[in-house]
Each structure stands twice: as structure tokens, then as C-alpha cells.
């Protein structure tokens, strides 16, 4: 069996967690902070959907492996905040992916739309910089990646039908 998307999912989590550790926060108007690495996180949510297609519900084990690697390669505090956010959003994603009968492209979009705000709120709260503006900006940042992949998958699915 091929595990390329599962490996990509694990690698992306580790890369993003490391990037959160080394890339400085950006100061926003009003004294709030925003992590520019959030622009990459949307791709993690989509990679999770592809990994779940490969390994089913064991995708949660892949997330735990990525969290363990992140704990040693990045800041343990960041890894724990990331794990907490991903764990909650993972179960939301799993529910959307498992119980809806929508086409894959729609499940990618719906699961990201549901999971990214929850992940953002938990992650930013745990690292101590949560604000309404920060959660919204981080969610929008994550959704950009998900929207790009959704668009590509949707067009690929349409091309198969034509």
C-alpha cells in the first residue's frame, strides 16, 4: 500500500510546527499578533483528507506521530498547542469526511471550513495570543490553502466527467 499522502501529512505538521517556532509573529494594528505561518496550515488540513483516504481512521495515529516528532524538533509548547487544535479539528474533519456522502472536493472544503476556526481558536489560546481578529485572520489564512486545493480537485473531478 502507498502511504505518500500520510507521509506528506506528517511532514507538513512537523514543518508547520517548526515554522511556528522559528518564524516571528507579525504585529497587527491594535497590538495584536498574527503568525504568518498560518498561511501554510490550510494545506495540512487538506493533506489530512488525502491521508484519511489512504489509511482511514488511522489518520489520528499519523497526527500523533507528527505531534511526537514536532515535540522534539520544535518547541514542545508549540507542539502541544498544535496537537490540541489538530486533535479537536481532526474529529470534526473525520465526522464530515466519514458521514457526508458529498464528493471528495466538497468534503475537503466543508471539513476545512469547520475545522480551521476551531483549530485557530484552540492554538492561539494555548500560545496566549487569541483575539477575535487573530482567530479570524488565521482562519482565513488557513482557508486560502484549502480553497486552492478544493478548486484544483473540483476541476479535476469535472474534467473526468467531461
Image (cartoon, rainbow, N blue to C red):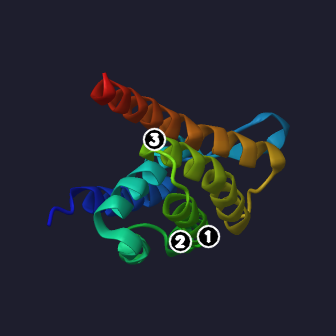
Indicate which disc residue 88 carries.
1
Residue name at image x 42 percent, y 55 percent: 49
140 or 93, which is in the foreground?
A: 93
Q: Is residue 99 left or right of 155 when viewed as pictured?
A: right
Measured in 3D between alpha carbons, the distance from the residue under mark 3 to the one under mark 2, in whole angstroms, is 25 Å
Q: Is residue 137 above or below residue 94?
A: above
Q: Looking at the image, is mark 3 or mark 2 earlier in the sequence?
A: 2
Q: Name the residue under label 2.
A: 83
Position in image of residue 81 (x %, y %): 59, 69
Q: Is mark 1 on a helix, strand or loop?
A: helix
Q: Residues within 10 Å of mark 2 (few under 14, many from 20)?
A: many
Q: Are marks 3 and 2 in contact (CB under 8 Å)?
A: no
Q: Is residue 5 left or right of 42 when viewed as pictured?
A: left
Position in image of residue 41 (x %, y %): 50, 49
Residue with the most extreme top position: 162
Q: Looking at the image, is mark 2 or mark 1 earlier in the sequence?
A: 2
Indicate which disc residue 105 carries.
3
Q: Is residue 135 left or right of 98 when viewed as pictured?
A: right
Q: Can residue 137 be seen in this view?
A: yes
Amino acid at each position: 500500500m502507498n502511504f505518500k499522502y500520510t507521509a506528506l501529512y506528517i511532514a507538513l505538521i512537523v514543518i508547520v510546527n517548526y515554522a511556528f517556532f522559528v518564524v516571528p509573529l507579525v504585529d497587527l494594528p491594535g497590538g495584536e499578533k498574527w503568525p504568518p505561518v498560518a498561511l501554510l496550515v490550510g494545506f495540512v488540513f487538506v493533506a489530512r483528507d488525502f491521508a484519511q483516504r489512504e489509511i482511514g481512521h488511522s489518520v489520528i495515529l499519523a497526527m500523533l506521530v507528527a505531534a511526537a516528532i514536532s515535540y522534539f524538533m520544535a518547541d514542545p509548547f508549540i507542539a502541544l498547542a498544535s496537537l490540541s487544535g489538530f486533535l479537536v479539528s481532526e474529529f470534526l474533519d473525520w465526522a464530515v469526511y466519514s458521514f457526508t456522502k458529498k464528493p471528495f472536493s466538497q468534503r475537503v472544503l466543508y471539513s476545512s471550513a469547520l475545522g480551521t476556526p476551531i483549530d485557530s481558536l484552540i492554538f492561539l489560546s494555548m500560545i496566549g495570543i487569541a483575539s477575535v481578529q487573530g482567530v479570524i485572520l488565521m482562519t482565513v489564512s488557513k482557508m486560502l490553502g484549502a480553497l486552492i486545493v478544493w478548486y484544483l480537485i473540483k476541476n479535476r473531478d469535472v474534467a473526468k466527467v467531461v
